[in-house]
Image (cartoon, coloured by chain):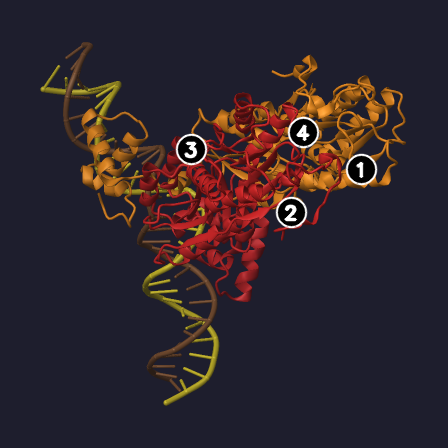
Chain colours: A red, B orange, C yellow, D brown
Amino acid sequence: MQDPSVRPTLATVAKLAGVSVASVSRVLNGMPASPEMESRVIDAVARTGYVPDAFARSLRARRTNQLALAVADVGNPVYVAMMRAIDASLRTTDYRLVLHSTEADLGAELDLLGTMRHGYVDGLILQSLRVGSELLAEITRLTIPTVVIGLLPDEVPIDNVRTDTRQGMRLAVEHLVATGRRRIALVNGPIDTVPGVARWTGFAEAMTAAGLDVDAAPVEVSADFTHVAGLEAVRRLLARTAPGAIDAIACSNDLIAMGALRALAEHGLRVPDDVAVTGMDDTDLAAMCNPPLSSVSTGAAERGATAARLLLERIEDPELPPRRCTVPPRLVVRESTAGGTSAASSGTRRPAEPAELMRGEP
Amino acid sequence: MQDPSVRPTLATVAKLAGVSVASVSRVLNGMPASPEMESRVIDAVARTGYVPDAFARSLRARRTNQLALAVADVGNPVYVAMMRAIDASLRTTDYRLVLHSTEADLGAELDLLGTMRHGYVDGLILQSLRVGSELLAEITRLTIPTVVIGLLPDEVPIDNVRTDTRQGMRLAVEHLVATGRRRIALVNGPIDTVPGVARWTGFAEAMTAAGLDVDAAPVEVSADFTHVAGLEAVRRLLARTAPGAIDAIACSNDLIAMGALRALAEHGLRVPDDVAVTGMDDTDLAAMCNPPLSSVSTGAAERGATAARLLLERIEDPELPPRRCTVPPRLVVRESTAGGTSAASSGTRRPAEPAELMRGEP
DNA sequence: ACCCTGTGCGAGAACGTTTACAAGAACGAT
DNA sequence: ATCGTTCTTGTAAACGTTCTCGCACAGGGT
């Protein structure tokens, strides 16, 4: 053991082992060496407590063994699920994942892309809510392999993993209609976001297809995709509409839906008896709500895993043509939409587990 | 503009500007230079699109401008709050925060501490559930400044930010007793964790102090501190106890409490009428639950901010004696414990906002 | 006119690795 | 014995910065 205040380097180890630094490096990197050499190096490494310096290695080898994941909001369980899936995909490789939360802020996102150019990481998975021209310009200027999770304009030559949330919202509304709801409200996220637009479109399409009047439908826009903003939005919605004017609320994601459940309880409205509620993303929160939340799965884990795969493939071969993967949405029905408006259910007090509950579950 | 496939270096810029690399470096680092020199360098940097290489810089300057935060579970909102606070504290500095989730796994934590020794970061904030001798040994071997969030043995000479969750659990139980509950159950997290032990101790103390029989109290241990595990634990608890045997459940954190709310609803039990529930951590989820969850705040944001401050101070001056900060717990009462057992409240259907609701809120 | 001090700048040496290259040893084939 | 061939090892040159020198020159005091 050496003085712990000064980190041992290859030279330290080499001197102790009586060999050259190159040989130490070779042994450590698993290149062929004589058994004699190996044992001397291994021994010296153990005695010095040597650990390679990440920066020197990266500088020389031109690879960092780090990948970055940027998500809009680490507080949203859907991104946690995504992160876990990516992390799992990376476990078999020797890449480390570093996580950045941009708080859905364009400035922070641009900032982040700026720091990417310092070469901190070998690749980037970017999940963004607001894919504007500014962001796209910055992404295409990036020299490192990048995969974007979320809807990207078709002509952009960047690997892209998406889910059809327009279709997802249609599934939700169709389900509400099928279970007898007619006075369906939409609580959307910000409409200057890609998901916000998609969900609005899907809602409008499904309503029209069901012969309902979209223009008359109550629509409220939440300040962001969090439960706090969702709660406030639904409070506004209930305040400005007549009692009984709404028998279902389709929410743009699970967090907003959770806020909706809270707001409805505040107003003394029963879910699903008085008002049905749907969420989206099918996060693990959905099953935990009171009542459990029907939600449209957007395949977060699958999207994460796919993004990781695409990124690794592109790092392997940068000449690959840009690829585009779509994960289909899937409706998961739970109690928050159980029964029709006239159903004489006793609500949340029954440990109800109708067969329907499991539909679409894995 | 140069060929974008080859990153410009200091040398590129220097050649274009007709000056030395040293001068470019000096200008870029804000050291004194003639106006003439400055403008030539600025211009050349702009024309080449030069961005400094993070690794070369770190290698030479022996600092990385990165700090690491390791938390047990990114899916737990309490850690998100902590992270946000740390992030905010770092915003005025030029440190970047890299986030690691250890999934409460000792192996992963040890792994992480191992990678720390590669010199990836200038400092570490570690939040761990299981602070055993193995982990402590590894931490003290670390050469970088480290702050631990969570209870550390007193003799360990490491900066430490803690909260007295034993006291916190006492607050919760005292509140339950004060509101008329007597048949109080504990749903704890794993007892081989530091928080698990603290909360058990606090529970036992408070029960004894209230003249209640701890040994007779139903105690269930959740597999971990997540809502899924909490739900299962409370299901077990309700399955093995007689109906009416429990009129309150003190939970070790908000996620477990959320699972408890769900399990109680499954069993047709009303909260708070039949059973009161308390959580801990006062995450933003607590106010969003149905009914809103009374919870003991453990000052996550404050702990995060304090940890960040301690870390920065130690980086500044490594010779500082080890410091220890304690954030007091604080009870936040919401509907899940409203009224006594005999209160004729109509439960969650009222938009109830008693004055008590706001007690302890900022 | 001289020396001293200060300032701006360039040359070049680190930082700790990886890796191209070459030198030498061992070995079988001629 | 000689000549490739292969295998092992050491030497030294990168990688892109920062930073210590020392040089040249300007300015002010004597």
The residue that disc 2 covers is B107
Residue A206 position, x and y percent, is: 48, 43
The residue that disc 1 covers is B220
Distance of mark 4 from mark 3, alpha carbons?
28 Å
Mark 3 vs mark 2: in front: 3
The residue that disc 4 covers is B290
Mark 4 vs mark 2: in front: 4
Using the image, name the chain to which the residue with label 3 belongs.
A
Using the image, name the chain to which the residue with label 4 belongs.
B
The residue that disc 3 covers is A191
- Number of other residues with Cα within 10 Å of mark 4, as a class: few under 14, some 14 to 19, many 20 or more: many
The residue type indicated by label 1 comes to Glu
Distance of mark 3 from mark 2, alpha carbons?
44 Å
Question: Which residue is found at the position 50% from the left and 51% from the top?
Answer: A328
Q: Secondary structure at mark 4?
A: loop
Residue B166 position, x and y percent, is: 75, 25
> Sequence-wise, which precedes: disc 1 or disc 2?
2
Distance of mark 4 from mark 2, alpha carbons?
37 Å
Q: Are marks 4 and 3 on the same chain?
A: no
The residue type indicated by label 3 comes to Ile
- Number of other residues with Cα within 10 Å of mark 1, as a class: few under 14, some 14 to 19, many 20 or more: many
Left or right for B249, reference A18: right
Residue A332 position, x and y percent, is: 60, 46
The quarter of the displayed image where residue B352 is located: top right
Image vertical order of residue B313 relative to residue B196, above or below: above
Left or right for B142, reference A211: right
The residue type indicated by label 2 comes to Gly
